[in-house]
Every structure is written in structure tokens, then in C-alpha cells.
Image (cartoon, helix red, strand yellow):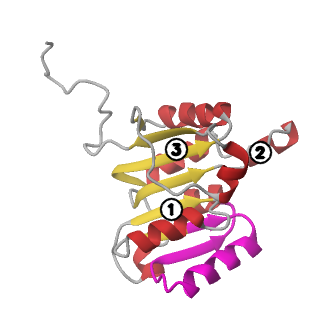
Amino acid sequence: MRAVPWSAIFGNDGPVEVEIGPGRGDVLLAFAAAAPGRNFFGIEHAGGAAAALAARAAARGLANVRVVAGDARYIVTELVPDASVAAYHVYFPDPWPKTRHRKRRLASAGFAAALARTLAPGGTVDVASDLGALVEAFAAELERAALVRVPGARAERPTTVFERKYAGDGTYEVRFSRPASGRDERAPAPGAEDG
């Protein structure tokens, strides 16, 4: 497969944010309404949910939203151009706790590498879940993919119906970024002096 340019999908060169698993679209639609100059792309595994979300976006007149049904791992790895995504949003992904469902989990080295490759310099990846272990597993893979954790950062987003029902105050969140300079900003610059 070949990467598809965002301009072919949105008809413009605006920055693109991708939400993986938007469900009913509470976050995606709120972001799109608040930032009409940005493009928002939802990747939803369930075809019916993707169609319903696209219909909700159309009913609200949100021309900056596109939704596709499919496996996010494949779409990001094979179809998203390098360094082209301003932000990824991964909120409450299915944990697939059963061992036989391990292959469906997003927290993997391959997927983290695909996110890092497709993230624009200075771009961010926000991950949230009611399962702290899931967030930390994802964080470990993102660190191995050379993304940098942003301490204490939280996405400014609406609370979803799922989150209100199941997570309450037990939401775990992390933000990672791709260094704008193209190098790991945790390391001192070449020739930098101590103190």
C-alpha cells in the first residue's frame, strides 16, 4: 500500500489530528467544532459506529471531520504519510484483557513505531484509560519509539459518556511528543556545558 496524502482526504493542507477509537465521537466532534481550521480523522473499528459518527458530523455541518472503519494498526502503519499528524488521541482503547485477544491490543512496539513515524515534529500523542497498567504499557512502547513523555500534561477534552459511567475519578493519562528538533530533547545538545 501507499500512503494517502491528507489533502486528498480533506481537500486542504490544514493540520490533521487523528482519534483512534472515537466511539460515539464525543471528543472528536467537540474538537472539530472548536477548531474549524484543523482537520479531524477518526479511525473506528466498528463499521456501524463509524457510519453513525460520520452522520453526526454531517448533521452538525462539520466539514473538517472524516471517519473510516478499519483496524487502526493497519491504517496508521500503511496509509498515513510520514511526519503528517499534528496529534493522536487514544482515549479508553479496548483493553482486551483475555490472553487470546492480546493480538488486538494497541500497546505494541510496531504500533508505537508507526505513531512516532507519522507524528509531525512537535506533535503529540495523548493516551487515557481507566486502567493504569494499560496506559503504562502504552507509555513504555512510546518511550521505546523515541517519543518524549510530557510530565503532568493532560489533554483538554470533554469527558465522554463511557468515562463518566466507568472511570469516574480513576482516569490515567499520559502525553508524549515528537521533539520538534528531530532529536531526543531529553539528551543535552552536543557541546552543551554543565551547570
Q: Quadrant of the N terminus?
A: bottom right
Identified at 40% across, 84% down, the residue is 11
Q: Position of residue 166 (x, y in %)?
A: 73, 47
As drawn, the label of residue 103 is 2
As drawn, the label of residue 113 is 3
Q: Is residue 40 above or below residue 156?
A: below
The segment highlighted magenta reads: 42-71
Q: Position of residue 92 (x, y in %)?
A: 65, 49
Report, in whole angstroms, how far the alpha carbon at label 1 lies from the one at label 3.
16 Å
Q: Position of residue 186 (x, y in %)?
A: 32, 27
Horizontally, is 195 left or right of 53 in the view? left
- Quarter-of-image position of residue 35: bottom left
Which badge, 2 or 3, is on the more N-terminal residue? 2
Horizontally, is 162 left or right of 191 in the view? right
Residue type of the residue flagged with mark 2: Lys
The reply to whether residue 78 is visible in this rendering is no
